[in-house]
Image: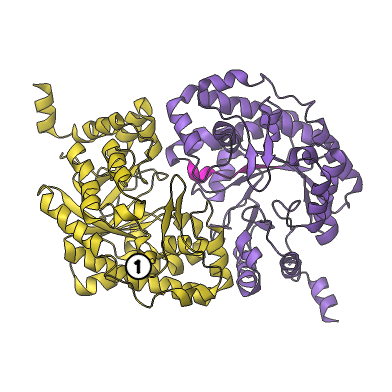
Chain colours: A purple, B yellow
Amino acid sequence: MDPPPLWLMRQAGRFLPEYRALRAKAESFMHLAYDPRLASEATLQPIRRFGFDGAILFSDILVVPDALGRKVTFVEGEGPRLEPMLDAGGLKRLAGKIDLDRLRPVFEAIGRVKRDLPDACAMLGFCGAPWTVASYMIAGRGTPDLAPSRLFAYRHPEAFAELIDRLVDASILYLRAQFEAGAEAVQIFESFAGAIPRPYLEAWTLGPIRRIVEGVRADIPKARIIAFVKGGGLGPEQVAKATGANAVGVDWSVDPLGLAQGTTPLQGNLDPLALAAGGEAMERAVEHVLAGFGGVPHIFNLGHGIIPETPIENVERLVQLVRRRDPVAALRAAL
Amino acid sequence: MDPPPLWLMRQAGRFLPEYRALRAKAESFMHLAYDPRLASEATLQPIRRFGFDGAILFSDILVVPDALGRKVTFVEGEGPRLEPMLDAGGLKRLAGKIDLDRLRPVFEAIGRVKRDLPDACAMLGFCGAPWTVASYMIAGRGTPDLAPSRLFAYRHPEAFAELIDRLVDASILYLRAQFEAGAEAVQIFESFAGAIPRPYLEAWTLGPIRRIVEGVRADIPKARIIAFVKGGGLGPEQVAKATGANAVGVDWSVDPLGLAQGTTPLQGNLDPLALAAGGEAMERAVEHVLAGFGGVPHIFNLGHGIIPETPIENVERLVQLVRRRDPVAALRAAL
């Protein structure tokens, strides 16, 4: 059996010393994300080092609100900051349409990566799901329980629905432009489905993701889209059906054993903390993922983003473990 | 149909102005928790104001590590602080056995509450589940994703298992003493099952909760125990079966419609943010909970703790909504 293709969420980032060196050259995180030369270099770094099968664009989900006129900054060691939206009035200070000109450096970065990427490596773009992006816009920052956005949705249901609609429209245009720039597939990141009461899952995230998928496909019928939905308690077949995505990313909390019964390609789901821990726990967790997803097309990945503290040698070992099922590699290793 | 019994997680706390006045009299949160007069008063305040059917002891899950020799303090507006446990060495600085003498004020508070509680109101004790308590002990504070405790569990599996064992033993003694002091039922709070990879659910939380339930019942065969397990994706019947608890608390993310098919009494599960939001969203959410749990014995509660920002009038309205199904009350209201 061939080994599954392999890439890691947030593989272009802080766990790499060469990324930290690159970051030191840029004035801020957003400068790095908006500099095509630096952003393409950050995207390529993990490919050069580990030979992953997918290159995920170095960027951030918050470039979308930034291009809707809500300026985003990153506080070192803390995370993103935006002007919070405390009530429906915040919508008025949102641009009517996403400013794709402002995002031109992102598309240029994709073009640059494509030029230098090995043929065998897929170029992946992405955006955040509307609920996840809206949550940062409403709270003005990350929060542990997403209380501000749930409160906003309950108190201002119409304004909330309009915010989601605007993010759907913006995401369609943004992803479309990524495909035009050379992305071969894109991932929609929903990190916070677990912070949505089940009766609202359809309205707050599954429906909006589906509308993005449909909107992108209206222009690019063969657009390949991965939906990563963390939490929410739905099986991947349900997520695939509800969103229309081609493949579903599975978070680390899910047991992959017994999951792989449908036909949807699945991506995931090693616990990033097991990778950070290394040793026996990691070896066992990797085996569990490899065994668990057997039976459907599987893209090996983490079940959430790699954490900055992850030792490089653990990632090297992961690559070995995932690829040793390749009979040729095993033969070479044995000789 | 009689209205379901009603109490709210964290009902003794900061959303009440009379609590804030009481808190101002104590030097620190822990002083308040360890002063039988003040702690019993805090416990009784929401009963006097709202006539809830259950009085949950005013205390904190972290008195257990405190009584194991890991001093706990609370930073105003931020939360608890303990000396973190970075490696297996931290276990050595843990007392061999829980110091029930240190917790005597807690038991005395229960006795005082019992003296003043209306007969129709049940006295409820509680403790945290070992995984939840261990997570605070390891990180030394609350964290959004419990990364430190997952990392500890992967890196030091034996030390982690011993820490969980110690917390199981301590919790058995602690809950037993609460029953002896007059608690009629206790709740075990597992707030973070959602931060456990599914293959570890049994070892990290369900098994330890079951051992606490069994340990308490070894001395008090009729001990009534509610297991509140937030996240983890298990149905309440599975939680009841895995833990042996008499009743299961359901978190707010779960849709109660269709849940009530077993025989286990269920408690929950209004979203605390819907209560904080009030208005139409709250009315609809309350109706959904009332309708959803129809068919099994139901204890109306939130699906997590009430948040400090909750307006008093929303809680008053909640009490009305839950109790208006009482035909006698409806008749009285109509006359």
Tag 1: amino acid: Ala
Extreme bottom residue here?
A: A335
Instruction: Name the residue located 44 percent from the left edge and 41 percent from the top edge.
Output: A198
Q: Is mark 1 on a helix, strand or loop?
A: loop
B58 or A12: which is nearer to us? B58
Badge 1: chain ID: B
Q: Percent x, y for residue B128?
A: 36, 60
Residue B218 located left or right of residue A140: left
The magenta span reads: A187-196
* Quadrant in which the C terminus of chain B appears: top left
Q: Percent x, y for residue B51?
A: 17, 40
Instruction: Name the residue located 17 percent from the left edge and 66 percent from the top edge.
Output: B180
Q: Is residue B298 visible?
A: no
* Quadrant in which the N terminus of chain B appears: top left
Q: Does the magenta stretch include residue A193?
A: yes
Extreme right residue here?
A: A115
The residue indicated by pointer 1 is: B67
Above or below for A96 versus A239: above
Residue A27 located left or right of residue B225: right
A151 or A319: which is nearer to us? A151
Q: Quadrant of residue A169?
A: top right
Q: Is residue B184 magenta?
A: no
Above or below for B202 versus A163: below
B79 or B128: which is nearer to us? B79
State the count of labels.
Answer: 1
Q: Percent x, y for residue A269?
A: 62, 58
Residue A16 located left or right of residue B41: right
Q: Can residue A163 be seen in this view?
A: yes
Instruction: Name the residue located 45 percent from the left edge and 33 percent from the top edge.
Output: A151
Q: Percent x, y for residue A241?
A: 57, 42
Above or below for A104 versus A259: above
